[in-house]
Image (cartoon, rainbow, N blue to C red):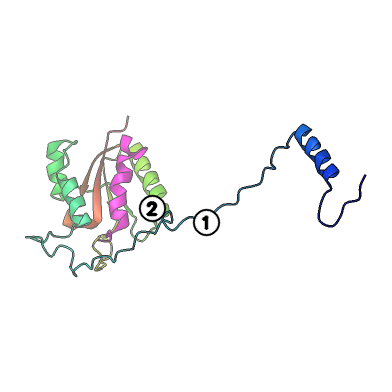
């Protein structure tokens, strides 16, 4: 084979290479990972500008109301509910009881007790009084302390005073209690309850 010079292939080498190139099958081009191209300026999403919030004028709650409502009084509402509850006992006895002319046959003073102390004490007292055949008993709760606060929601005054009627209506006491009323002033007024019991069998 003639020796290749510095200038390139000889005529024989070039002819041989051409024959090999014609008989060769080209390979598939290598698969190259396509690099993520940066978004064009036209595709780059510009976030929406944050608009400043409108400043609200200073105002006070209820300033545009034509008439300011009176704040609710939970103690007053409870008294009204008991006063307007339907009478379940004998009406003649009811009138005497509400006028303070019926003498309670037993009494319990829950004033100063916690709820966890008062509930079992009241349950035991009422059930024992019913078993003994008593009809009218007095439950003293106290009116609670006044707490003047500027809060829009009033703080309940006298937790025991509000809790006792619910206990007397719920089991097991609801089965033996016939009526509940606020006591007359001579027996404690708003800080005590008349509890009229059903007849024991």
Side (left or right) of 7 relative to 67: right
- Image position, residue 145 (x, y; %): 28, 65
- Determine which quarter of the picture holds residue 135: top left
Asked if the magenta segment contains residue 164, the reply would be yes
- Mark 2: secondary structure: helix
Q: Nearer the viewer, residue 129 or 70?
A: 70
Asked if the magenta segment contains residue 49, the reply would be no
Residue extending furthest toward the right: 1
- Image position, residue 103 (x, y; %): 21, 48
Residue at the (31%, 33%) spot, across then down: 200
Q: Which residues are magenta?
A: 154-175
Question: Which quadrant does the N terminus fall into?
Answer: top right
Disc on res. 38: 1
Residue at the (28%, 33%) spot, across then down: 199
Q: Nearer the viewer, residue 62 or 21?
A: 21
Side (left or right) of 32 relative to 150: right
Side (left or right) of 90 relative to 44: left
Q: Is residue 143 above or below residue 11?
A: below
């Amino acid at each position: 084979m003639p020796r290749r010079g510095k200038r390139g292939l000889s005529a024989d080498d070039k002819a041989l290479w051409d024959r090999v190139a014609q008989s060769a099958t080209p390979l598939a081009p290598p698969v190259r990972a396509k690099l993520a191209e940066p978004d064009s300026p036209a595709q780059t999403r510009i976030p929406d500008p944050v608009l400043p919030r409108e400043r609200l004028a200073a105002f006070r709650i209820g300033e545009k109301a034509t008439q300011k409502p009176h704040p609710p009084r939970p103690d007053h509402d409870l008294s009204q509910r008991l006063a307007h509850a339907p009478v379940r006992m004998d009406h003649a006895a009811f009138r005497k009881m509400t006028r303070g002319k019926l003498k309670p046959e037993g009494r319990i003073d829950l004033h100063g007790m916690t709820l966890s102390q008062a509930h079992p004490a009241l349950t035991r007292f009422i059930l024992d009084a019913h078993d003994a055949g008593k009809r009218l008993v007095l439950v003293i709760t106290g009116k609670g302390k006044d707490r003047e606060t500027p809060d829009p929601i009033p703080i309940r005054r006298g937790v025991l005073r509000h809790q006792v009627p619910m206990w007397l209506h719920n089991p097991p006491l609801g089965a033996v209690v016939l009526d509940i009323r606020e006591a007359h002033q001579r027996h404690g007024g708003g800080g005590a309850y008349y509890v009229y019991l059903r007849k024991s069998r």
